Image (cartoon, rainbow, N blue to C red):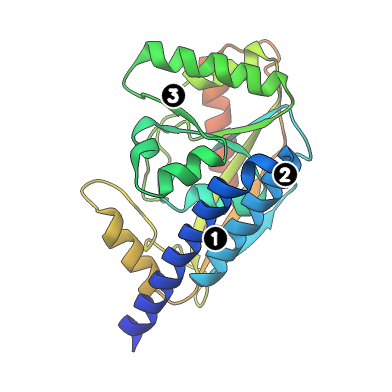
Amino acid sequence: MKAMGAVWRLLRGLGHLLVGLWIIQTRFHRLSPAHQQAHVQIWSQQLLALWRIRIEVRGDPVTSGPALLVANHISWLDIVVMHAARYCRFVSKADVKDWPVVGALATGAGTLYVQRESRRDAMRVVHHMVDALRAGEVVAVFPEGTTSDGLHLLPFHANLIQAAISAPAPVQPVALRFLDARTGLTSLAPCYIGDDSLLRSVWRTLTTPEIVATVTYGTPQTADGRDRRSWAADLRASVDALRTDGAI
């Protein structure tokens, strides 16, 4: 019965992905930016509900841009969870663009793509981020550059933080956690690290009793004379404090 329920949720989720793709390809271009953002947020909330993932928002997300959000990175679910909490324009690794269905959804939602192994491409993306911030948008990055198990925080790469200095724009630290709804303990089911496959991670998530995704927003901060490396280190400390506050 557990497996049957997971298969049913998987099929419903795939159907929801296809509906999202249809909306992007047929209706999105006729909507205002505000309505596009609302569609992305509602669609993300619906997907989480279909997959029995409850979202809890703690703290206050910025109400408007320009702002850069920096968050820890645990799972393929992170972008959906953050969109469900508050629409933002993500910076993601370039290969996501070529993923079936998901790539089209990410592109339609305004994702900026970066070749993480290329310093030159990172600088190109920084310029696009600066343009977006100066246009009053909210942009989000995962400065760890890859996913972790959620129990530990990796070092923050500083390159993309330069965008907030150049714009200039405030940065809001954001902490993500996945919890077992029954025990309140950290859930490793959504993790997507190392040799793990996306399919295994999705299956673990769907066969796990209700998961709570927490999104904790910290206090926005400005550079105040810090260079990107020192600011990245301070932002990592802020995210770590938010992430471990009350953690078990």
Query: Relative to 128, does residue 149 appear above or below in the rendering?
Result: below
Residue that sits furthest to the right in the current view? 63
Label whose residue precedes the other's in the sequence (1 or 2)? 2
Q: Which mark is residue 157?
A: 3
Query: Relative to 63, does residue 214 appear above or below in the rendering?
Result: below
Marks 1 and 2, how far apart at CA: 16 Å
Of residues 99 and 229, the one nearer the viewer is 99
Residue 91 percent coordinates (x, y): 50, 31
Find disc 2 in the rendering and name its residue.
61
Marks 2 and 3, how far apart at CA: 23 Å
Tag 2 and tag 3, C-beta contact below 8 Å: no
182 on left or right of 218: left
Label whose residue precedes the other's in the sequence (2 or 3)? 2
- What's the residue type where badge 2 is placed? Pro
- What's the residue type where badge 1 is placed? Ala
Q: Would residue 247 be visible to someone looking at this image?
A: yes
